[in-house]
Amino acid sequence: MGRLYMREVSLRVDRYLVNTRVTPNQLTYLMTVCGVLAAPALLVPGIWGAVLGVVCVQLYLLLDCVDGEIARWKKQYSLNGVYLDRVGAYLTDAAVLVGLGLRAADVWGSGRIDWLWAFLGTLAALGAILIKAETDLVGVARHQAGLPPVKDAAAVAEPRSSGMALARRAAAALKFHRLILGIEASLLILVLAIVDQARGDLFFTRLGTAVLAGIALLQTLLHLVSILASSRLK
């Protein structure tokens, strides 16, 4: 999304910020707030809640582009900024999926709240966070073992087993795992909200919640196996 269109927008925003006292880290904090606000936005019933969720996530994406561009322009680099950027990504992905679960539970509806859907949304959020953590923990493990960071990520990520390598390439081609990322998930939620509006219930939103929870759990396991079967920890 950033490469497709947001970089064109962010560069136009940068010109208004480069000569101000706004720091990249302040933009990263604001980015995180926008991403987290997607969860309460999705609680608004009907299509408008889904639209608000997309707007929050798109603002997150915009600021995610802007903070790095401003940091490079002003030469204001810091480990704090890298860390905060990762935290923002974790929280945004989780917020969208938790918001989806609460939306599917119909917390503002007139009937009984079905907490099963809230649980499934939270389960999907946990899976999305664990997948990111599995990747980040490779660097932690290598650092604690006194090993240098992985230099050629593409080469070392390839599983040593030919069967595992084929399965990994198939999964990468399908890209189904991207559905649990905040940006893609928010757009999917909007599509589900539109078809639910035509149907008059939450059937597709609930179906989507169950599917994303399943994808998150499956991808968490497959990603862990992929890391252990590769040379990233060697």
Image (cartoon, rainbow, N blue to C red):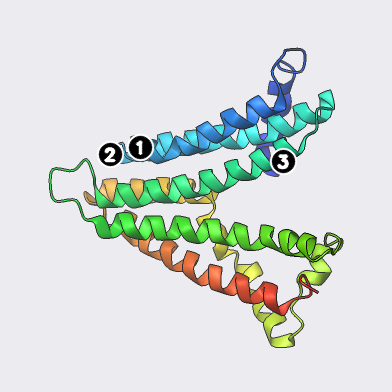
Residue 220, given in percent of the width and then of the height, sits at 54, 68
Residue 140: tell me if it is visible. yes
Q: Which residue is mark 3?
A: 82
Identify the residue shown where x is 56% and y is 63%.
177
Residue 230 vs residue 203: left or right? Answer: right
Q: Quadrant of the N terminus?
A: top right
Closer to the N terminus: mark 2 or mark 3?
A: 2
Question: As displayed, is residue 45 above or below residue 69?
Answer: below
Question: As displayed, is residue 85 above or below residue 178?
Answer: above
Q: CA distance from mark 1 to mark 3?
A: 31 Å
Q: CA distance from mark 2 to mark 1?
A: 6 Å
Residue 36, given in percent of the width and then of the height, sits at 48, 38
Task: Assign a secondary structure to mark 2.
Answer: loop
Residue 179 vs residue 133: left or right? Answer: left
Q: Which residue is mark 2?
A: 45
Residue 107 picture quarter: top left
Identify the residue shown where x is 48% and y is 51%.
185
Identify the residue shown where x is 57% and y is 58%.
178
Residue 179: tell me if it is visible. no
Query: Could you tell me if the residues under marks 2 and 1 are in contact, i.e. CB atoms within 8 Å?
Result: yes
Residue 86, given in percent of the width and then of the height, sits at 64, 45
Q: Which residue is mark 1?
A: 49
Mark 2 surroundings: few (<14), some (14-19) or many (≥20) residues within 10 A: some
Question: As displayed, is residue 17 above or below residue 226?
Answer: above
Mark 3 surroundings: few (<14), some (14-19) or many (≥20) residues within 10 A: few
